Image (cartoon, rainbow, N blue to C red):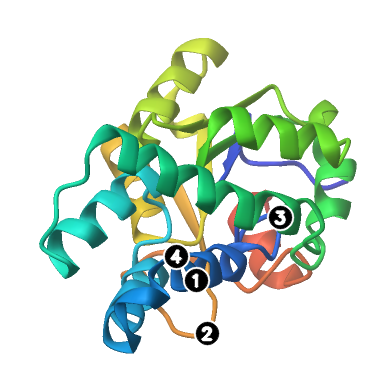
Amino acid sequence: MKLLKYRVIVFDFDGVLLESAGIKTKAYAELYKAYGPEVVERVVRYDQRYGGFSRFEKIRYFHKEFLGKVLSHDEEMNLWNRFSELVEKAVRQAPWVPGADRFLSRYYRDAHFYIASGTPEDELSRIISGRQIGHYFKGVYGAPKKKEEIIGSILLESGVKSGEMVMIGDSITDYQGAMKAGIDFIGREHLEPIFPKEVMTIRDFNDSLAIQRALFYEG
C-alpha cells in the first residue's frame, strides 16, 4: 500500500490540474493585440515565465511597463472583465493534466487537498463547481491573495507543521510562494525547465517514478 509523505498537498490549478495555462496566455495575447505584435510577444513571454501571478498584477504591469500607462480603476475593471469572459468558459472545458483526475479521486481521502491559484477566487469557485470536483478539496483559494499568504492560511487552518505540507506548481511564483511559506515544493515542468536544479519535478501525474519519489514513502 502506498503511503503519502504529506498530510496536506496544495495544488496550483492552471497547468497543474488542468491543461489550461495556455488558455490564459492566448487571452492575454487577444487583450493586447491592438497594441501590435511586439507588445503581444512581450506579454506572452512574461506570462509564460511568471504564470503564478494574478491577472490583476499582470495587467497593471503590462500597461505600465510595456505601454507606459497607469490604468484607472474603471479601465482595470473593464480589462479584467474582458479577460474573464475570454477564459472562464474555456477553462471549464479544459482537459485534465494527464493522471490528475485519477490522483485526486484515489488519494483525496488520504491527505487534505487544497488549491492555491492566481485566478480570482470567485471565478475559481465557479469553475470548480461547474466541473463538480469540489469534494476533492478542503479549501479553494485564489487572487487577490498571494501564494505565500494562501499557504500561510492553510498552515493555520489545517494545523499541520510546515514539513507536512507540499505545494505542486508550474511557475516560479508558485516556487517562491512555497519557499517564503517554508514548505516543500514539487514543480510541474512544461516545455522548458524553469526551476532551480535542486527542485524535484514531474511531467504529469502519469509520471509514476517521479510521483512515487516526490510524494510517497519508499517500500
Q: Which residue is mark 4?
A: 31
Please indicate whether residue 38 sits to the left or right of residue 108 in the image: left
Q: Are marks 3 and 4 in contact (CB under 8 Å)?
A: no
Say if residue 109 shows up in the picture: no
- Seen at 82% across and 57% down, the residue is 93
* Amino acid beneath label 1: Glu
Spatial separation of the CA atoms under disc 4 and disc 1: 4 Å
Q: Which residue is mark 2?
A: 191
Q: Mark 2, residues whose alpha carbon is within 10 Å: few (<14), some, or many (≥20)? A: few
Q: Which residue is mark 1?
A: 30
- Seen at 43% across and 27% down, the residue is 150
Spatial separation of the CA atoms under disc 2 and disc 1: 22 Å
Chain-order first, disc 2 or disc 1: 1
Q: Nearer the viewer, mark 2 or mark 1?
A: 1
- Image vertical order of residue 134 relative to residue 49, above or below: above
- Image vertical order of residue 175 relative to residue 133, above or below: below
Please indicate whether residue 2 sits to the left or right of residue 26 in the image: right
Of the pair 107 and 80, the residue shown nearer to us: 80
- Seen at 35% across and 79% down, the residue is 40
Q: Position of residue 24 (x, y in %)?
A: 54, 62
Please indicate whether residue 100 sits to the left or right of residue 80 in the image: right
- Seen at 25% across and 49% down, the residue is 60
Chain-order first, disc 4 or disc 2: 4
Q: Which mark is residue 91?
A: 3
Q: Position of residue 146 (x, y in %)?
A: 35, 35
Please indicate whether residue 59 sits to the left or right of residue 86 in the image: left
